[in-house]
Amino acid sequence: MVARVWSLMRFLIKGSVAGGAVYLVYDQELLGPSDKSQAALQKAGEVVPPAMYQFSQYVCQQTGLQIPQLPAPPKIYFPIRDSWNAGIMTVMSALSVAPSKAREYSKEGWEYVKARTK
């Protein structure tokens, strides 16, 4: 009984995290033009390091541990506009060949099963 409840709780937590991620992507319009994606990445780069520092300070205060000062994160420039189309092209290419690959793999699997049962 406990195992079923625990597995249900794990499923609900994972579903909530996945749903939250989908909502965040939709709310921030990250699947739209690359300008908005670039702006969201830049905003995250500005917000995340101070938040991590504040969290580490909070943990230090609550636990009494001393965390050494970490070096500043490197400045990373990742042009989403250049890689966005390449990613979309790769995904669409994979989706377009998926039916033929599925048929090919199932045929190979069927031949393997037939060979093993003889």
Image (spheres, helix red, strand yellow):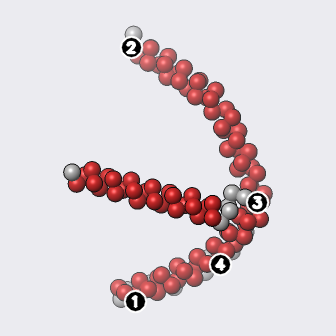
Position in image of residue 64 (x %, y %): 36, 88
Q: Mark 1 sits on what residue? A: 61
Quarter where residue 14 is shown: bottom left
Specify the quadrant of the image occupied by residue 77: bottom right
N-terminal-most mark, 2 or 3: 3
The residue singled out by tag 4 in the image is 46
Q: In this rendering, does residue 71 appear at all? A: no
Give the Cα distance between marks 2 and 1.
Answer: 66 Å
Label 3 crowding class (10 Å Cα cut-off): few <14, some 14-19, many 20+? few
Question: Is 66 positioned to the left or the right of 70 in the image?
Answer: left
Could you tell me which residue is drawn at 58 percent across and 24 percent down? 103
User: Dots 2 and 4: beta carbons under 8 Å?
Assistant: no
Mark 3 residue type? Pro
Which disc number belongs to residue 37?
Answer: none
Does the residue at mark 2 contact the one at mark 3 (Cβ under 8 Å)? no
Tell me which residue sits at (52%, 79%) in the image.
52
Type of amino acid under label 2: Thr
Q: Distance between the residues labelled 3 and 1?
A: 42 Å
Where does the image place residue 92, in percent across and percent down from the top left? Answer: 70, 41
**Which residue sits at x=57%, y=58%?**
22
Q: How many residues crowd mark 1 within 10 Å: few (<14), some (14–19), many (20+)?
A: few
Q: Where is mark 3, residue-wise?
A: 33
Q: Tag 4: Cα neighbours inside 10 Å, few (<14), some, or many (≥20)?
A: few
- 67 is higher (above) or lower (below) than 10: below
Q: What is the x, y in percent for residue 53? A: 52, 83
Question: What's the distance in space between the residues labelled 2 and 3, CA to CA?
Answer: 54 Å
63 to the left or right of 54: left
